Amino acid sequence: MNLKEALFKQCEAFVNKRLQNIEEVISSNQKALQSETKSTAGDKHETGRAMLQLEMEKAGQQLAGITQMKEILNRIDISKQSKTAHLGSIIKTDKANYFLSISAGKLTACDKDYFAISISSPIGKLLLGKQVNDVIVFNENSIKIEEVF
């Protein structure tokens, strides 16, 4: 398995784990909503239902974010090679290594750390379209691009 494929698979696993967690939360909240029966406390019941509704809305928003991440991953062609940074590129710099994909945080492959970042993140926007020897400035730090593949 090559480096790009290893990083891509870790991103997929990250998304699938988040999806599983959200589905469990939604299922749990649906069961709680169904079991919530009208009690003599009245207000207490209504507050409980309102809190569950808020949790469901929050989980729904997270589910939408995960769906968007899956769509981004589906657009990545790991076999595509280019000298210009694009979605799916691995970018090695003098400061850190990046995988332009989704915001999945720090990943480790081939005994090196890579940061999976979105192309819509601040540093992702700066790296997009750059080539070897280009320099970007992020948080007042100059970052030199050493390799793009």
Image (tube, rainbow, N blue to C red):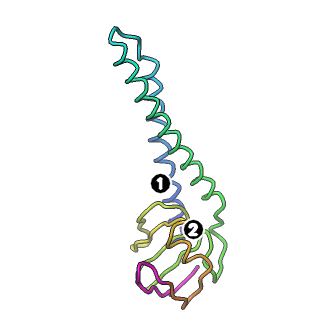
Point out the stretch of residues depicted in magenta. Answer: 137-149
Q: Nearer the viewer, residue 121 or 10?
A: 121
Other residues around mark 1 within 10 Å, as few (<14) / some (14–19) / many (≥20): some
Image point 52% across, 78% down: which residue? 91
> At which x and y percent is residue 133?
54, 91
> At which x and y percent is residue 31?
45, 23
Q: Quadrant of the C terminus?
A: bottom right
Q: Is residue 83 above or below residue 32?
A: below
Q: Is residue 88 above or below residue 26?
A: below
Indicate which label's residue lies in the foreground, 1 or 2. 2
Whether residue 5 is visible here, answered yes or no, is no
Whether residue 45 is visible here, answered yes or no, is yes
Mark 1 to mark 2 CA distance (whole Å): 17 Å
Asked whether residue 147 is drawn in magenta, I would say yes
> At which x and y percent is residue 121?
52, 67
- Amino acid type shown at disc 1: Phe
Instruction: Identify the residue under disc 1.
Output: 14
Does 24 sit left or right of 148 as displayed? Answer: left
Image point 53% across, 71% down: which residue? 124
Q: Is residue 128 above or below residue 10?
A: below
Q: Which residue ends up furthest to the top in the rendered image?
A: 40
Q: Which mark is residue 119?
A: 2
> At which x and y percent is residue 132?
56, 88
- Number of marks drawn: 2
Asked whether residue 71 is drawn in magenta, I would say no
Image point 47% across, 47% down: which residue? 18
Q: Nearer the viewer, residue 112 or 84?
A: 84
- Amino acid type shown at disc 2: Ile
Residue 141 falls in which quadrant of the image?
bottom left
Q: Secondary structure at mark 2?
A: loop
